[in-house]
């Protein structure tokens, strides 16, 4: 019985002398969204390429849906979906033609692209050539293409990079919807807020290595500081104070502040994933 | 595990390639335009070029140039003076050569235009020499043809094949090859765009395999080239020279064009680089066809050019009416070259696609 849909064991890859991925291991369950976070050159895209059969690891193994992944395996590749970082669409074809073509390659007969096009709000431009599309429209079509075969595992490489808030939101909703249907989603992103919002677990990847892997909440609990920021009027002056919720006398301090008549504002603060990333890896995104 | 080809996926990729081709303005202008130009060129060229050479003579009143003398194939134009003839030949562009006899008939001058070929030069000198014999005979009151071993009406002109090969027929193999190679550039363009835009990566994460993709590219190239060359053969009426050997030659030629397209498409860094590389292939491949325009046998090195078999096959079918069996050695040579080029093309393209 397959317990996890992706099993990666100690994979390595190098471009010549440059080691891009150095011993990565993890697994993913059905319906899980795993956020891969890391700066440029961290090895995120190389990892996705190894997991989708575009590159073969120099060592280690990749198992997708219980089967060892090798290049050109139509059975496995028919059950995965990939959204590339590059907008590699056929620009002289329409959105409808693009989706029909890819559905055909997956062996899907009588495919109706309109349902997908409605989901990504491109139905009104379905017959226009992709060359006339905006960046956001192309990205939405990329995501639609990646789920044309209703994949069990979905790889999304920076799916919302450079998009306006409306386009980003619609793509995030689509990702959540897909995960609710049981698709395992591996998502790479620079956007810590997005990763926090979408991911069940996040992986901090830096210089080809995994530095941390856990749920966003656990990482915050483990590495972050919960604080309360308050502003108090003290006679003619305004005093600002930061109280750590992890300190032993936090309760007593908070009680005193709440009872203080000069209390102006009070805010809770938790560590962001970005703060934790910097703390763990020693560098920003 | 052996990955099997899936012909339905191959068909889908070919269909997609043809759709992309039909929407590419550059090739949609270039392909029909080249076809139109070459068909037009062949239509405009006269079927049998006029071989009459214009010859200036002085004095035109001289009996040898007048009357019933046999100057077939030459247009005799008389001049008032030796100097006028000299100026007309040496400074004009109408006359190939001029013959000036001294009033006494004791000497003859031959003026040659700079556009005279060595063969025409030798022919003119021989003609003048013959003219001298005729004058000598006439001055002695004898019949110039007396004493000849054969009678002039017994001359027989015999050519290999169906007759003299006109310049128009000599041009046909060259246009045939150029049309094929234009389509090889079109395929190279399609491949380079697929690589540059990384759409090949998107194909290979579907159920389509590298083999499906490679076969589809070969077929796209063959389809584009063979369609163009069939249209060319049909519009120019060349098919009537021998449809079976021409169809087989066209198919093999299209295969060669496809292989060359794959090599240049995969080897180029971008679209312009691909076009440049394509030209590097195209120019040497036209050389055997170009060489046909000149008289004489092709040199040894020429026979080593991959398109030699293609050119000679087309040339023999058109010029000599050769059948499939006659051109089989040329087609076999083409087949060997095609296999080599296709292997190189597949290897280069496979490496390029896998490295994306």
Image (spheres, rainbow, N blue to C red):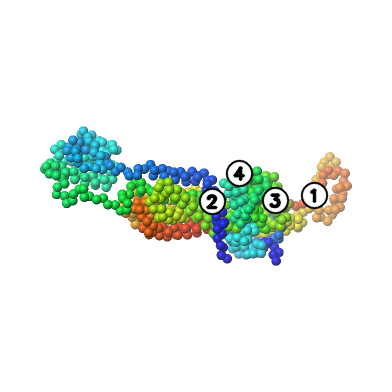
Is label 3 or label 2 in front?
A: 2
The residue at 18%/51% (across/down) is B150
Q: Given contact means CB atoms under 8 Å apart, are the residues at marks 1 and 4 in contact?
A: no
Read off the residue under disc 2.
B17
Counting residues from the start of the chain, the first of labels 1 and 3 encountered is: 3
Is label 1 or label 4 in front?
A: 4
Chain of the residue displaying label 1:
A
Could you tell me how far apart the alpha carbons at marks 4 and 3 are, in whole angstroms? 23 Å
Q: Quadrant of residue B201?
A: bottom right
Nearer to us in this view, A270 or A81: A81
* A207 relative to B166 in the view: left or right: right
Q: Are marks 2 and 4 on the same chain?
A: no
Is label 4 or label 3 in front?
A: 4
Chain of the residue displaying label 4:
A
Total marks drawn? Answer: 4
Is label 1 or label 2 in front?
A: 2
Nearer to us in this view, A64 or A219: A64
The residue at 46%/52% (across/down) is B226
| Crowding near the residue tagged with mark 4, few <14, some 14–19, many ≥20 C-alpha atoms within 10 Å | some
Viewer can see residue A282:
no
Counting residues from the start of the chain, the first of labels 1 and 4 encountered is: 4
Could you tell me how far apart the alpha carbons at marks 1 and 3 are, in whole angstroms? 31 Å
Q: Tell me the element at label 2.
A: helix
Read off the residue under disc 4.
A128
Q: Tell me the element at label 4.
A: loop
Chain of the residue displaying label 3:
A
Q: Given contact means CB atoms under 8 Å apart, are the residues at marks 1 and 2 in contact?
A: no
Could you tell me how far apart the alpha carbons at marks 1 and 2 are, in whole angstroms? 58 Å
Read off the residue under disc 3.
A174
Could you tell me how far apart the alpha carbons at marks 2 and 4 are, in whole angstroms? 18 Å
| Crowding near the residue tagged with mark 3, few <14, some 14–19, many ≥20 C-alpha atoms within 10 Å | some
Q: Tell me, for residue A268, which label it has, or none.
A: 1
């Amino acid at each position: 019985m397959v317990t996890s849909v992706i099993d990666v064991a100690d994979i390595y890859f190098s471009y010549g002398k440059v080691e891009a991925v150095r011993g990565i291991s993890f697994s993913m369950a059905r319906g899980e969204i795993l956020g891969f976070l890391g700066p440029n050159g961290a090895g995120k895209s190389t990892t996705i390429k190894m997991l989708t059969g575009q590159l073969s690891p120099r060592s280690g193994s990749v198992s997708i849906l219980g089967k060892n992944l090798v290049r050109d395996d139509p059975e496995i590749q028919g059950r995965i979906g990939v959204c590339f970082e590059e907008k590699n669409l056929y620009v002289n074809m329409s959105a409808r033609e693009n989706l029909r073509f890819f559905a055909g390659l997956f062996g899907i007969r009588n495919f109706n692209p309109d349902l997908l096009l409605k989901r990504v709000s491109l139905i009104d431009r379905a017959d226009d050539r992709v060359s006339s599309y905006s960046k956001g429209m192309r990205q939405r079509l990329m995501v639609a293409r990646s789920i044309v075969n209703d994949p069990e595992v979905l790889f999304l490489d920076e799916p919302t990079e450079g998009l306006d808030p409306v386009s980003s939101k619609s793509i995030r909703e689509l990702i959540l919807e897909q995960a609710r249907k049981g698709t395992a989603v591996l998502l790479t992103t620079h956007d810590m807020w997005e990763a926090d919002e979408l991911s069940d677990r996040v992986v901090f990847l830096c210089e080809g290595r995994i530095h941390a892997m856990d749920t966003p909440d656990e990482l915050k609990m483990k590495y972050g500081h919960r604080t309360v920021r308050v502003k108090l009027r003290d006679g003619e002056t305004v005093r600002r104070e930061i109280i750590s919720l992890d300190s032993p006398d936090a309760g007593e301090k908070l009680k005193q502040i709440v009872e203080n008549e000069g209390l102006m504002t009070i805010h809770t603060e938790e560590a962001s994933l970005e703060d934790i990333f910097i703390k763990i890896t020693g560098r920003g995104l | 595990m052996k990955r099997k080809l899936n012909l339905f996926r191959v068909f889908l990729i070919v269909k997609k390639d043809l759709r992309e081709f039909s929407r590419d303005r550059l090739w949609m202008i270039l392909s029909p335009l080249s076809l139109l130009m070459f068909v037009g060129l062949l239509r405009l060229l006269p079927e049998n070029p006029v071989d009459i050479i214009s010859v200036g003579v002085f004095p035109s009143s001289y009996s040898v140039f007048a009357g019933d003398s046999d100057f077939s194939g030459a247009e005799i134009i008389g001049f008032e003076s030796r100097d006028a003839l000299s100026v007309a030949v040496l400074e004009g562009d109408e006359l190939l050569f001029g013959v000036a006899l001294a009033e006494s008939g004791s000497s003859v001058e031959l003026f040659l235009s700079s556009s005279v070929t060595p063969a025409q030069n030798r022919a003119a000198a021989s003609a003048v020499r013959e003219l001298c014999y005729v004058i000598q005979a006439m001055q002695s009151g004898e019949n110039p043809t007396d004493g000849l071993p054969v009678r002039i009406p017994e001359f027989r002109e015999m050519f290999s094949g169906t007759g003299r090969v006109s310049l128009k027929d000599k041009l046909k193999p060259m246009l045939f090859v150029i049309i094929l190679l234009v389509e090889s550039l079109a395929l190279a363009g399609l491949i380079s765009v697929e690589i540059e835009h990384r759409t090949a990566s998107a194909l290979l994460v579907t159920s389509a395999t590298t083999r499906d993709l490679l076969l589809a590219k070969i077929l796209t190239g063959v389809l584009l080239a063979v369609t163009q060359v069939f249209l060319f053969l049909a519009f120019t009426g060349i098919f009537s020279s021998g449809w079976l050997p021409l169809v087989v030659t066209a198919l093999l030629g299209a295969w060669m064009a496809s292989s060359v397209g794959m090599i240049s498409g995969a080897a180029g860094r971008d679209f312009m680089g691909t076009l440049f590389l394509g030209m590097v292939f195209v120019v040497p491949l036209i050389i055997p066809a170009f060489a046909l325009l000149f008289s004489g046998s092709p040199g040894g090195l020429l026979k080593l050019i991959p398109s030699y078999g293609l050119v000679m096959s087309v040339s023999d079918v058109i010029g000599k009416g050769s059948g499939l069996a006659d051109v089989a050695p040329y087609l076999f040579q083409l087949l060997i070259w095609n296999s080599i080029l296709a292997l190189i093309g597949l290897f280069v393209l496979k490496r390029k696609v896998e490295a994306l």
